[in-house]
Amino acid sequence: MIQIQSLGKQFQNETQITYRDMIFETGRSYMLLGASGCGKSTLLNMIAGVLSPTTGTILIDGKDMTAASQKVKDRFRIEKIGYIFQDFKLINEMTVADNIGILRLEGIDISGMDEMLEALDIFEKKDAKIKHLSGGQKQRVAIARALVKRPDIILADEPTGNLNFAIGEQVIRQLVEVSKGKTLIAVTHDDRLAKYFDEVIDMNEMTSGMQDVPSGKEDC
Amino acid sequence: MLKFALKNMAIKKMQVILITLSIVISAGIAVLAFNVATQVDEGITNNAGYYSAIVGPAGSSTQLAMNSMYFTDEPVGTVPYSIVTTLQQDSRVTQVIPFAMADNYNGYGVVGTTPAFLQSKDLRVGEMFAADETLQAVVGSNIAKYNSLEVGDVIYTSHSANGSDLHTKGITIVGILKESHSSYDNIVFTQLKTLWEMHEHGEQEENSAEEHHHTHGTVCAVLVNTKTPGFAMQLVEEYDGKIITADDGDNTTLQAIEPMSVVRDVLNDADDTKYIVFVLCAVILVMNIMIISIITLLNMYHSAKEISLMRLIGISMKRINLLYVIQNGIMGLCAVILAFFVSRGCMVLMNDYVESMGVVLNMSKVYAAEFLILLAVFIISVLPTVIWTFSMSKKDGITD
């Protein structure tokens, strides 16, 4: 269970976002909807330990992660969190297998890689370089890398942001399928995908203050 | 980790090759310069200290020393053999070795002397030529190797450098010297009388005028050892500039030198050159260090995206540091190993030039300082990465 309590984040440009208290139950899937700059991606980054909140606490299974050291946060992220980034965060010159194999640097077991790639219909591209894949295929690789380590929490930041609706819907369907039994929090703009999630949270109602979002960027 | 580092290097192979080549060039030059300069220095010094004085005809003192000790250049001229007899009777003198150089065998010089000249050299096979015989020779190891010569073989020396004017009398090889990586490896040693005998024959030939330097009863130099260094100085003072009259009535002006001081002068000149080479190498090395550092830092700058990506998925800075240190360590290690072999390859190319100074470069000779140079280059090739990743760790590139 993830508990958000009195959480706030102030950025260097003085923009501040304050979050209402929230609870994400274990084993349920959540879709975060909201306008650009409302703080959806910032919330995911703070849960993942990539960003530190300015105020408040994030309790994960009762443990205050905001007070933990960066080393503990890193360890927690690599072991317990599967983070799917909007822009994939893959190394283009490396193969699908090598991009997932990066996790072995931290001793993560990736023995389920083939099974995961098959579940995501991308197994035949295992030895292909990322630069030769389509956007949809890259997104599936990013999902595979996030889920292969069997994380307890899956964070997905605009997982369909770079895909057309048909492919995006297929990716979300697969993501929800492979995430069953885990906590899934996905940020998206597309409310047509809401039917695949247990709960939809309108972040416009859960936050106050807005981030400046550069033109063309949708990740708030 | 190693597997991933190798894969990561493979995707940047052109960059890796360029950095490695840059390190190979700088380290190779530094090691080569040090090794060659040291071997030349040692080779020249080892030979020079052996004799107290050298007496020969007036002319260039350097030429006299270099010819009689390192067999380089032409002899300055000849002096009557009576000088040898006179010196042998001198109570201050412990050893007198006549030295004459004439003719060649397939381009290798032929030296006429006594067995005492080779007393510090070991024979690989056979025995020393007999002092009271003629037409016997001991050959250097390179001559035996490259001409497939064995003890008992008969060789024919020649007046001319192109080997077209062969003497009719053959010289029997009685011994082969052990390889010494010096100019002794490339010389045929025989009795003085053998040379005289050849040239009595030579004088009967039509072109005997070319051989006037080596007529019967003359030598090119006399190598002398004295009881004390003071006696050597006295001899040099006495014989230097002295005019003697030979049996045929010809006057000959002598020069006498202390070989160590002559060689010291040569080495001083060579040292200046050596220091210039070292300074140039140092400049090249510093420039290369800067280039290596800049390339490595640019490499790391370009890797910042990769590092940031790894940080986002949870790879710790400690692991990332290790990954890049391994990558640069592999490059640095390959580069210094290659640099070592490149320097040895260059020594093969330089050997002909260095042989003219009487020194044969030994490829297998390795100095501890060479390893220090290579170690320094290795550290320099890894250091920028360590500094970069360390500073990245301090900043922790992912937050805010």
Image: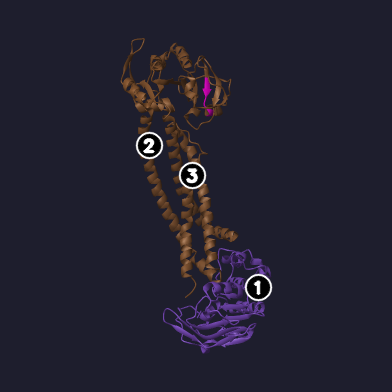
Chain colours: A purple, B brown
- Tag 3: residue type? Ala
- Residue B270: numbered disc: 2
Q: Are marks 2 and 3 on the same chain?
A: yes
User: Residue placed at 43% from the left, 58% from the top?
Assistant: B294
The verdict on residue B140 being magenta is yes
Secondary structure of the residue carrying numbered label 3: helix
- Tag 1: residue type? Leu
Highlighted range, magenta: B137-141
Residue B37: which quarter of the image?
A: top left
- Tag 2: residue type? Ala
Q: Tell me residue B322's x, y (percent).
A: 54, 62
Sequence-wise, the earlier of marks 2 and 3 is 2
Secondary structure of the residue carrying numbered label 1: loop
Q: Output the chain of dot 3.
A: B
Q: Quadrant of the N terminus of chain B?
A: bottom right
The front one of B258 and B80 is B258
The front one of B39 and A32 is B39
The front one of A147 and B228 is B228
Q: Output the chain of dot 1.
A: A
User: Residue placed at 58% from the left, 66% from the top?
Assistant: A130
By secondary structure, the bulk of the magenta-drawn segment is best described as strand
Which residue is denoted by mark 1 in the rendering? A120
The verdict on residue A97 being magenta is no
The front one of B367 and A144 is B367
Give the distance between the C-alpha atoms of the residues marked 3 and 1, in whole angstroms: 59 Å
Which residue is denoted by mark 3 in the rendering? B368
Q: Tell me residue B92's x, y (percent).
A: 38, 20
